[in-house]
Amino acid sequence: MPLADDIPLARRTTPRPRRQASLPRRLAQVLLTSVLLAGGGVLLLVGPLRRWITPPPVAGLEARLDQDGRLLGHFPYPEATPEELVTFAPGLRLRPEAARSLEAMRAAADADGISLTVLSAYRSVDLQKQLFFDVKAERNQTSADRARVSAPPGFSEHSTGFAVDLGDGRLPATNLSESFEVTEAYRWLNRHAARFHFVRSFPKGNPQGVSYEPWHWRFEGSTQALEMFEPAQRLAR
C-alpha cells in the first residue's frame, strides 16, 4: 500500500488579517467576495485577489487537486457505466460511437496494408487502481513517478470509454513502447487518425507532464467527448 505522504496535501495560503481597510478597498473586497450568477444560481466565493482557493480533496486519496483540477498531471474523468459501453472484441469495450469509428479506422488501415491492433480500451476505475497502486508498489515507485506512465484511479481517459491503446500487428515488440513511433501503423495514424476523430493524448513534451505515449489515442468525435476532453485541449493550446 502507498504511504500517505506519497501524495502530500497541498498547503493552503491564508493572508494575514488586516486592520480596517479604507472604504473603497472594503467595497472592492465585497464585490470580489460575493458574485452571484443569476442564470445558474451559483454562488462563487472569490475573496481578495491574493487569496488562493484550494480545491476539495480527492475522494479516497490523501491529496488535493491542482488549481486546474488535475492530480499529478492528470485530469479527472467520469467512469462509463456498463450500459454506455459496447463490446467490439473479446474483452474490449468502448462507447458505441468510439467503437464504430475505431472499426472504420481499422478497416481503412487494413485496406492500406496496415495492421492496427487494439491493446486496451475501456478500463474500470478498480482496474486502474490496481495498475496504479499495485504496480507502483512492485516497482518501488513514488506516486509522481508512477503518474508519468499511469493515471491515478478516477483520472484515466480509459475509464471514459473513449480512449484506446493501439499497436502494429506486424511488430508486436513495439507494443506500449516509444518504439511504436517507428512503425508503419503509427505513421498511418499520424496521417489518417484525425479523419476518424482520434487524436494522440500525450505527445512529446505535453503540458500535462505525462510520458510520451505514441500508442495512446482518444476519440473526440462527439459533443460528449469534446466536452469531456476540453480541459486537456485547453491546456495544450
Image (spheres, helix red, strand yellow):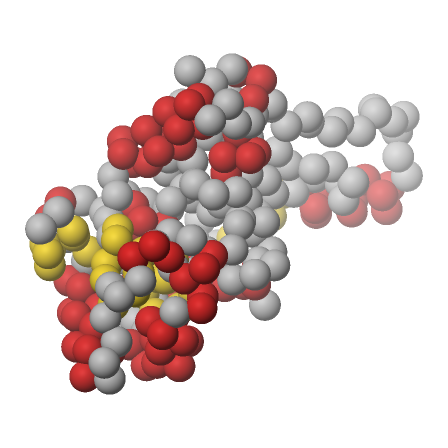
Q: Position of residue 97 (x, y in %)?
A: 19, 67
Quick check: 53 left or right of 98? Answer: right
| Along the line of sight, the residue nearer the viewer: 218 or 173 | 173
Q: Would residue 27 appear left or right of 89 to someone viewing this image?
A: right
Coordinates of residue 236 in the picture (x, y in percent): 56, 63
Q: Where's the N terminus, which quadrant?
A: top left
Q: Which residue occupies 9% across, 51% down? A: 90
Residue 159 drawn at (x, y percent): 29, 46
Can I make out residue 65 in this image?
no
Residue most extreme to the bottom: 112
> Exactly how many numbered labels are in the figure?
0
From the viewer's side, name the closer residue of 150 and 167. 167
**In the displayed structure image, the side of residue 184 where residue 103 appears, left or right:** left
Instruction: Give the residue drawn at x 45%, y 59%.
Output: 179
Judge whether residue 80 can be spotted in this image.
Answer: yes
At x 19% / y 58%, what residue is drawn?
Answer: 95
Residue 33 occupies which quadrant of the picture?
top right
Quadrant where the C terminus sits is bottom right
x and y percentages locating residue 211 in the rendered image = 53, 50
Looking at the picture, tell me which residue is in the foreground, 81 or 46: 81
176 to 25, vertically: above or below: below
| Residue depicted at 47% across the width and 47% down the height | 75
| Vertical relation: 190 (above or below) 218 | below
Observer-nearest of 48 and 103:
103
